Amino acid sequence: MANATSAVRERPRQQDLPRQRSRQQSEPLSPTMRSDLGKALRARTPRESQAIFEPTPDRPDPVALLQEQAESRVPGLIPVRYGRMLASPFSYFRGAALPMAADLATTPISGLTVQDCGDAHLSNFGFFGTPERNLIFDLNDFDETHTGPWEWDVKRLAASLEVACRDNGYGSRDSRQVVMASAAAYRRAMRRLAGLSNLDVWYMAADVERIRAQFVRQLSARQRKLASKARQKVVTRDSMQALDKLCVRAGDTIKIQADPPLIVPLADLVPADGDGIGADYEAQLKRLIGKYRRTLQSDRRALLEQYTFVDMAMKVVGVGSVGTRCWVILMLGRDGADPLFLQVKEAVASVLSRYWRADHYANEGERVVAGQRLMQAASDIFLGYVRAEGLDGQNRDFYVRQLRDWKFSLPIEQMIPRGMRLYAELCGMTLARAHARSGDRIAIAAYLGGSRVFERAIADFASSYADQNQQDYDRLVRAAETGEIPVERGV
């Protein structure tokens, strides 16, 4: 353990870390040299040291960090955010990306970097449709994407699995097996990817039918029935389904139905003239859509131009995102049965940006879009970004995507240990594939090696961090009880 502790004290400075992409561009290294680099990094950061999580004496108060985030958010929604985070330790974990980023910045790193998701917890993986109308499994949330150490994503995923297992009532042995399964899958997948060509890595995507067959075999009869129904519903989760759920018709008119504070139509937020939304706001919306359209590929711009703006509403989404400005836009194509729902979500600086060298994007929405396109096997055809003036007169960055496009996440809380273990493996493999697109997969694979040293270390880290997460959750509970934070539950 002396070597592991030393690795923490002597964690390399950012300016000393290898810059893989730039070096490969100017002086390409052979696969052997890249493998040797990965193995050499074990001396500086032993794989066993990845187990270490030692909170520093000056560790920031997690509630203070959350309150700091709240300063730039919609004030009326902050109680909803806290209420959702207080639902369980895992719900807290989902919203606590910033506190964990601060903690990860104190842990050992090998020095190999990738495009990080930045918030790779298990509920940010799921199914969605590709432009070719195939169903794939991949990461699906990139609000916090940023360059950084590959270990940070792996550790956030591992800790989320440990926390979720505890929430589900699993024993310590089952929980550890789940976490180790994920880390082992990441290691094995990275080693396989190291032997593939660049194009093979780029085109790789999850085989959903094989995954489904494997997963279903692990479920009970009741769970198999539920899984079958869920799969049938996946392809119905599109703009037409959103139209039926979110809108109301009055004759030939279609409007987004108000459900405050979760859904507030634009007409309820701005002055109206005799025909509805004020002419000034109508003109602003057209300019906003035009600016966003310019960030799309030309063929997708042509498709978007065939749709006409109908309505817009502010919509609360997620757990950690609650309070950021998020809108849904309803557009119609050939008729009232041809809807397109776009989600316009505020993009603020990644939680990783405080602890890693900056990504140089003029627009935070562009950062999200660039990271998503780099990590995902296939991305939404309407993925783009825009800077727009809000109702308060402040300019903010946003990214845009379809509201629903066969998107579906598995019900984590209903999984038995065997099913959770398979899901953990799937997430680990998927994360490795996403990292291999941007990082030095050969060096990372060599660092990980062929033994189980790495996954044991990650399982130890996850257990320690789940303990810390429980303490932080308890701290939030006390803050709610004493009135330190405002809370609105059940919303």
Image (tube, rainbow, N blue to C red):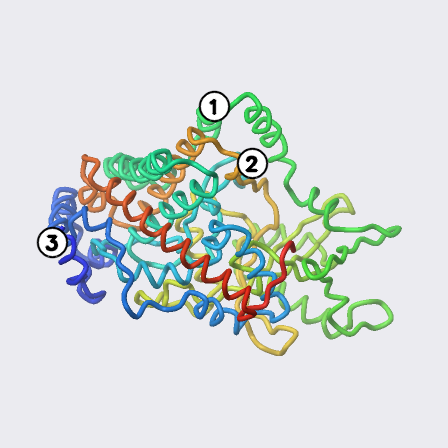
**Mark linked to residue 359:** none
For badge 2, the amino acid type reads Arg
**Residue 6 versus residue 250: which sits nearer the camera?**
6
| Mark 2 nearby-residue class (10 Å; few <14, some 14–19, many ≥20) | few
Sort mark 1 into few (<14), some (14-19) or many (20+) by Cα contacts within 10 Å.
few
Mark 1 = which residue? 213
Depth-wise, is mark 3 or mark 2 nearer the camera?
3
Which badge, 3 or 2, comes first in the chain's sequence? 3
Residue 120, image x and y in percent? Answer: 41, 49
Q: Is residue 69 above or below residue 375?
A: below
Residue extending furthest bottom?
A: 393
Instruction: State the residue in front, 358 or 315.
Output: 315
Residue at figure coordinates x 51%, y 51% from the top left: 91
Between 143 and 487, which is closer to the camera in this rendering? 487
Tell me the distance, in whole angstroms, between the alpha carbons under discs 1 and 3. 45 Å
Mark 3 and mark 2: span between their CA atoms? 53 Å
Q: Please name the amino acid that badge 1 sits on.
A: Ala
Q: Nearer the viewer, mark 2 or mark 1?
A: 1
Which residue shows up at 42% across the image and 28% down it? Answer: 418
Q: Which residue is mark 2?
A: 133
Left or right of residue 355, residue 292 in this image: right
In the image, residue 240 lies at what x, y percent? 70, 43
Horizontal relation, residue 255 to residue 421: left or right: right
Query: What residue sits right under mark 3 in the picture?
Result: 2
* Place of residue 352 in the rendered image (x, y in percent of width and height, measured from the top left): 37, 62
Mark 2: which secondary structure?
A: loop
Report the amino acid beneath label 3: Ala
